[in-house]
Amino acid sequence: MIVIFSDSSDVHADAVERVARSRGSEVARLNRDETHRWSFDFLCGEPILNLDGRAFTADKIRSAFVRRLPDKQSFAQLSINVSPEAYDYIATQRLSLTSDCIALLSERTRVINTLCSTNRAQSKASQLFVADKVGLCTPQTYSGANPTLARQQINQIVQTGSRVCTKPIVKAIVMLDGQKRTRFTELFDESDFADLETPE
């Protein structure tokens, strides 16, 4: 079995899963926004994957592809009818157990990418630093919540004749009016200047 850690909107993981299945491999897709379908247990030193009512021991997993790891928010939705304090506590415990089992699994089978490299790759600041260090052409970038600095950076870029795009620092899915929403990379338009003043 090949295990893919990602989320349901990841088209890159979709492509890997499609190719793996076309070659006859059994694939377990563990999306961080669908933790109601899967979980890990730790028993006598071994991680056990539970997926859609089936249990798989570590020896059944031949490789793992780590695209996106779950975070505390991934498990918060599982805790209902409890106080906010208990809600946060339970999500923290579930994340810790899952992280431990993923780390242990990476010691038992081939993993692309390692947990360390996956966490590092999720940092846009680190990505830009490394890309610049090895000589790649990187865009002028600002991350933060200071509207004055943001406006200055945008004006500098526009004055050179270039376009500006905006994107979230961390990809996340949020429930709004009962629907899952996310934000993608978008071109910045002059009408978007007003949004720079909002706290979001």
Image: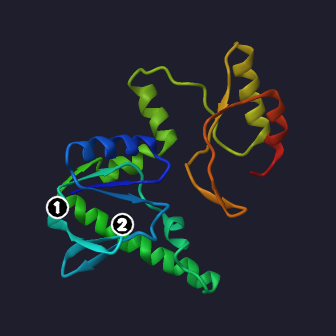
Residues 158 and 5: in front is: 5
Q: Is residue 106 left or right of residue 80?
A: left
Q: What residue type is labelled 2?
A: Ser
> Whole-percent x and y of residue 142?
64, 35
> Whole-percent x and y of residue 52?
36, 70
| Location of residue 133 with respect to 86 vertically, above or below | above
The secondary element bearing badge 1 is classed as: helix
> Whole-percent x and y of residue 17?
32, 46
The residue indicated by pointer 1 is: 108
Label 1 to label 2: alpha-carbon separation: 14 Å
The residue indicated by pointer 2 is: 99
| Location of residue 6 with respect to 86 vertically, above or below | above
Q: Earlier in the sequence, mark 1 or mark 2?
A: 2
The mark found on residue 75 in the picture is none
> Whole-percent x and y of residue 151?
78, 32
Q: In the displayed image of the protein, which residue is found farthest to the left? A: 59
Q: In this view, does 113 lie to the left or right of 182?
A: left
| Location of residue 119 with respect to 96 vertically, above or below | above
Q: In this view, does 85 lie to the left or right of 10?
A: right
How would you rate the neighbour count of disc 1 (Cα within 10 Å): few for under 14, some for 14-19, many for 20 or more? some
Q: Which residue is at a point 43% across and 70% down the rendered structure image?
A: 95
Q: Which residue is at a point 56% across and 77% down the rendered structure image?
A: 88
The secondary element bearing badge 2 is classed as: helix
Q: Which quarter of the rendered picture does the N terminus lie within? A: bottom left
Q: How many labels does the image show?
A: 2
Q: Which amino acid does label 1 sit on?
A: Arg
Q: Which residue is at a point 72% across and 30% down the rendered structure image?
A: 188
